[in-house]
Image (cartoon, rainbow, N blue to C red):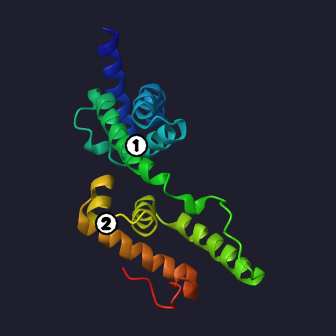
Amino acid sequence: MADEQGRDNDAALVIQARRGDANAYAALLHRHFDAAYAIAFRLTGLAQDAEDACQEAFARAYFRLNDCKQPSRFAGWLMQIVRHHAHNVRRYQALRSATSLGSDTPIAASDDPSADAARAELAAALRAALAELTGIKRAVVVGHDVEGWTHPQIAARLGISVFMSRRHLADAHAQLRARLGPAWRDEDGGGIDD
């Protein structure tokens, strides 16, 4: 009986939220947050990742609220969106550890302090430029350029096509070139080959 009443309440709140009632949508999220978080945490294993997955799922659900065909089954519909976003977060976890470029690992010193300073400055600029990329583009760049993965390997790990892996890499390299300017060169002075 309580479950049926909860579904009726969900249906009423969904209808109100579709009419633009932000409080109704907030009530839906408050009601289902614990379950959504539990699912996201179970799939990602990290509190921050679970929170990120929930936040993305809640935003997506809000913008797709009209796609919820059975408002009385809002909870199940929302949990499916949460699962989808949690799976996406989990795909990137394997690559996140490869972003050692973002760490403060010291750069090997040479006999030329000015060259060391220039390399440290370039490393900082590269970290900042990588941080501006979307998660998927950063994952592809790190996988390809740092880890040496092939496009088929990247595609398999990220659940995307080889074509999209190549496309994300080309787009990311273009963004990095625009951000870093002349610093985006290999040691021979040539450009990066996509």
Judge from the rendering whether residue 174 lies leftward or rightward of residue 71; answer left or right. right
Residue 60: x %, y % from top left: 38, 47
Residue 41: x %, y % from top left: 45, 32
Q: Residue at x 36, y 22 (%)?
A: 9
Q: Is residue 19 visible?
A: no
Q: Residue furthest bottom?
A: 189
Q: Is residue 59 visible?
A: yes
Residue under label 2: 150
Residue under label 1: 57
> Label 1 to label 2, Cα distance in Å?
31 Å
Instruction: Pick the residue in front: 102 or 106.
Output: 106
Camera-near label (1 vs 2) is: 2
Residue 180: x %, y % from top left: 57, 81
The quadrant of the picture occupied by the N terminus is top left
Q: Residue furthest top?
A: 1
The reply to whether callout 1 and callout 2 are in contact (CB within 8 Å) is no
Which disc, if any, is residue 107?
none
Q: Residue furthest front?
A: 111
Q: Earlier in the sequence, mark 1 or mark 2?
A: 1
Q: Amino acid at mark 2?
A: Thr
Q: Could you tell me which secondary element the residue under label 1 belongs to?
A: helix
The quadrant of the picture occupied by the C terminus is bottom left
Q: Residue at x 33, y 29 (%)?
A: 75
Residue 162: x %, y % from top left: 25, 65
Instruction: Pick the residue in front: 194 or 119.
Output: 119
Question: Would you identify the image quadrant in which residue 156 lies?
Answer: bottom left
Q: Amino acid at mark 1?
A: Ala
Q: Residue at x 29, y 44 (%)?
A: 66
